[in-house]
Amino acid sequence: QQQVKQSPQSLIVQKGGISIINCAYENTAFDYFPWYQQFPGKGPALLIAIRPDVSEKKEGRVTISFNKSAKQFSLHIMDSQPGDSATYFCAASRVNDMRFGAGTRLTVKP
Amino acid sequence: KAGVTQTPRYLIKTRGQQVTLSCSPISGHRSVSWYQQTPGQGLQFLFEYFSETQRNKGNFPGRFSGRQFSNSRSEMNVSTLELGDSALYLCASSLAWTTGELFFGEGSRLTVL
């Protein structure tokens, strides 16, 4: 069962543009919402995370927006760079349990 | 500080065989979780161990099992392999799950022929 729905499946953005990836979850017991970045041949690495008591969190060029009532959250990468090209996974977590979205393959064209 | 180490990195098996994958977590991390990654399905949660106890299990058949040792190293086993078991199997460790941050290994890529 897909407890976390992620879209789009793939995304192509020009260098300098904004990359936006959306996720929706079902289980209101989740209390931690991380985004992971995965490069080919590597395991996922934590990019940024948010808890439901915060509506937005920004770290450098990356922002998470969180809408608790809609059970949705999104990742925004500003001024996207070719080095950002990777697969991004959203996730929803509670103690002992983390569920991932299906992933978004981001390609940033120079 | 060494990261999460998974062995073997690549392996090829035939249908009906079994396979054991190993994971050494970051030193001091007591929680180890396992995920199956396939194209289109993303990362599917298999199970999580803490202090040698399985605390949670995903929606996989009983052919998938795991265990954790007293030194926090973990193994997962898949018996009676099927073609659909071909995937990248990722292990992740964390201190105690409370922070939610997982540290992933590079995975073991299993091909079932």
Image (cartoon, coloured by chain):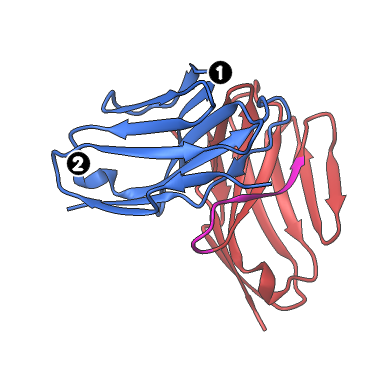
Chain colours: A red, B blue
Residue B51's disc is: 1
Q: Residue at x 78, y 30 (%)?
A: A52
Q: Is residue A51 magenta?
A: no
Q: Could you tell me which chain the residue with mark 1 belongs to?
A: B
Q: Which residue is mark 2?
A: B82
| Screen quadrant of the N terminus of chain A | top left
Q: Nearer the viewer, residue B20 or B36?
A: B20
Sequence-first disc among 1 and 2: 1
Mark 2 and mark 1 in contact (Cβ < 8 Å)?
no
Q: Is residue B87 above or below residue B98?
A: below
Q: Amino acid at mark 2?
A: Glu
Q: Could you tell me which chain the residue with mark 2 belongs to?
A: B
Q: Amino acid at mark 1?
A: Ser
**Residue A86 pos. (x, y %):** 59, 64
Real-space CA distance between mark 1 and mark 2, rounded to the nearest whole angstrom: 31 Å
Residues in magenta? A40-49
Q: Residue at x 46, y 30 (%)?
A: B74
